[in-house]
Amino acid sequence: IKDEAVIKAYNENPDTDFHEWVATQCKIKRKPAKTVNFSTAFGAGEQNIVGQLAANSDIILEMTDVVNAKILAGEISEDERLKAFTELCWTRGKQIYRIYHDKLPTLKSTARKATDVARARGYIFNLYGRRRHLPGKAAHVAFNTLCPGSAMDLIKRRMTLTAPRYNPDMVRAGITMRVNVHDAVLHHADHETIVKWAPTIKEMLETPEPKLSVPIRWSSKIKRQRWEGEN
């Protein structure tokens, strides 16, 4: 989305949690921030997003406290609780929606642009040039294709570097690649070899081509657990 503040945050701290960052910018909790992030990115309209926010557990708790305070102060009666609560939740949802788009205006416009491109020509390219056809009503998932689709191709390209089939050093070290599930890759070898090679594998996974405006980071763990059936 080419938001300079977000890019700056990631380059200063590659472990930045985007949902937490948005929550801090908008002065809300992480859960509603995550709701509005994904809903906006994947094409939900204002009414839909405000409705999701109004039903968010954090907003519900916040507005319950407000209603209770108003009843104790005599501003509303107990009979008016439900009506006041519903109105406050929706008002808070609309407030968050406005603050969010003031703080992060390029997310919605970028998602909309991706949809418009897909609708106009019937397909969209991801970061690596892979084309996905999205005719007619399918155009609304264009931004979704652009983001997770690019991430998956990034992983596939990095996996090629670490796959024994294409990396003779891995073969000589006795390392095999067992499985890839979404954003997880499992390599296998004896414990001493994996400990030695883990930093190298991590470095290869974290250096995508082309170079991106934000750093790519992988977390890694080493376990001694054996595969079932192995000696």
Image: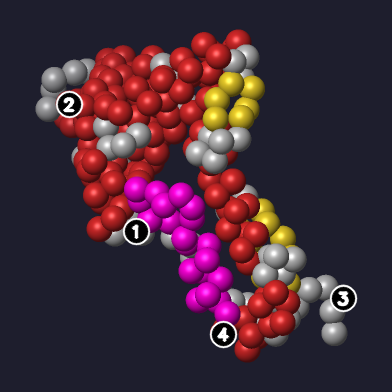
- Please report whichever mark, 1 or 4, sits nearer to the chain's N-terminal start: 1
Residue extending furthest right? 229
> Which secondary structure, mark 2?
helix
Q: Is residue 145 visible?
A: yes
Q: Say whether residue 26 is left or right of residue 149.
A: left
Looking at the picture, does residue 98 appear above or below residue 7?
Answer: above
When asked about the image quadrant of residue 196, the answer is bottom right
**Residue type at numbered disc 2:** Lys
Cα distance between the residues tagged 2 and 3: 65 Å
> Which secondary structure, mark 3?
loop
Looking at the picture, does residue 1 appear above or below residue 139?
Answer: below
**Residue type at numbered disc 3:** Gly
What segment is highlighted magenta in the picture?
197-216
Residue 14's tag is 1
Q: Say whether residue 81 is left or right of residue 134.
A: left
**Mark in front: 2 vs 3:** 3
- Please report whichever mark, 2 or 1, sits nearer to the chain's N-terminal start: 1
Q: Say whether residue 27 is left or right of residue 185.
A: left
- Please report whichever mark, 3 or 1, sits nearer to the chain's N-terminal start: 1
Cα distance between the residues tagged 3 and 1: 39 Å
Looking at the picture, does residue 129 appear above or below residue 140?
Answer: below
Residue carrying label 3: 229
When asked about the image quadrant of residue 185, the answer is bottom right
Cα distance between the residues tagged 4 and 3: 25 Å
**Mark in front: 4 vs 3:** 4
- Categorize mark 2 by other alpha carbons within 10 Å: few (<14), some (14-19), many (20+): some
